[in-house]
Amino acid sequence: MDRRSFIKRTGVASLGIGLNYHKTFSVTKNNISNPLVIATWNVKNATEKAWQILSKKGNSLDAIEQGCMVEESNEQGQSVGIGGLPDRDGNVTLDACIMNHKGDCGSVVYLKNIKHAISIARLVMEKTPHVILAGDGAKKFALSMGFKEENLLTEKSKTDWINWKKKEKYKPIINIENHDTIGMLAIDKNNNISGGCTTSGLAYKMQGRVGDSPIIGSGLYIDNEIGGAVATGLGEEVLKTVGSFLIVELMRQGYSPTEACKIAIQRIVNKPGSNYKNFQVGYIAVNKNGDTGSYAIQKGFSMTKYDKNGNKNISSLFFEKI
């Protein structure tokens, strides 16, 4: 056996072992007559906005953008858009990505003074030859697209930051405000799936820190033949396991969305030396048949789902050590 054949065979074998393949995903519905949208955490206003678009036969990408924008405008959220908690130097910096059913995607990282990071991410996807724009370049692009600068640091977030500086204790806060990143997945009348993710990142992070949320494959991944997944929580741990891509690949092998999310969580908690008891990660997922699911490390994570049965917040299953 030559070297190339050996690498190919051992690579495929190790992939199979890693994913524990057991069956192959099959589409049971050619068309979903009733669209749906799901999102991380209790964000009924956001899913309602997305549903308004979907119910009027709008496309899933528009629903994702408009739904995420609701939370980006919510000053009370303290983790998305305006009002987001700043880095340790007092700067609110935003990360976001978006992905459509064709596999096109766009992302912005370390974006300052522009509230709707999800919209800039979409414009990166549609108006540039790139996938990711960062920092001053992302801001310059946003301004060139007609967006206006605004101060994103509200008085509440500023006060919280000043109080934090007195002790400067730096650690992830589990389920902060019961809400941090908003991740959203939608299926439209044409059974096309899109997704988005937007955040102001880890509270009081080091200047320049970027988590999983704007990284395709980690914070978000869509494969229109299979489904989509999105992450929330401590981004460093999601990045290390490429969680959203993993979940979609598990669904490709026939695992349900909940099963796939659970395995992705187990990848994190079973890592040697994992201190998973001290942080939160949660995933939500949807497959092409419209089945949805979620799973988290810690109790307290939830998913909001809007479909023909209404707008509901659903508590997530969570990890229990056996």
Image (cartoon, helix red, strand yellow):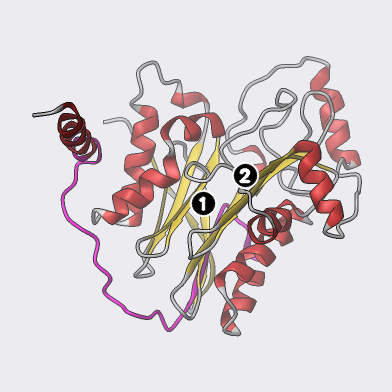
Quarter in which the C terminus is drawn: top left
Q: Is residue 55 left or right of residue 153?
A: left
Quarter in which the N terminus is drawn: top left
User: Residue drawn 46% across and 47% down?
Assistant: 283
Mark 1 or 2 closer to N-term?
2
User: Residue drawn 40% across and 79% down?
Assistant: 32
Q: Callout 2 environment at 10 Å: few (<14), some (14 to 19), or many (20+)?
A: few
Q: Quadrant of residue 30?
A: bottom left
x%, y% of residue 165? 82, 19
Mark 2: secondary structure: helix
User: Residue drawn 35% across and 61% down?
Assistant: 226
Q: From which residue to which does the magenta span run?
A: 16-45
Q: Is residue 243 magenta?
A: no
Q: Is residue 199 left or right of residue 262?
A: right
- The amino acid on which the numbered mark 2 sits, given as a three-letter code, is Asn
x%, y% of residue 236? 54, 29
Q: Is residue 253 above or below residue 174?
A: below
Q: Is residue 313 above or below residue 31?
A: above
- The amino acid on which the numbered mark 1 sits, given as a three-letter code, is Ser
Q: Is residue 32 magenta?
A: yes
Q: Please, which residue is most extreme toward the left here?
A: 1
Q: Which mark is residue 224?
A: none
Are the two marked residues, 1 and 2, in contact with CB atoms closer than 8 angstroms? yes
Secondary structure character of the magenta stretch overall: loop
Q: Callout 1 environment at 10 Å: few (<14), some (14 to 19), or many (20+)?
A: many
- Name the residue that disc number 1 marks: 302
User: Residue drawn 68% across and 19% down?
Assistant: 170
Whether residue 292 is visible, yes or no, is yes
Q: Is residue 34 above or below residue 115?
A: below
Mark 1: secondary structure: strand
Whether residue 261 is visible, yes or no, is no
- Name the residue that disc number 2 marks: 178
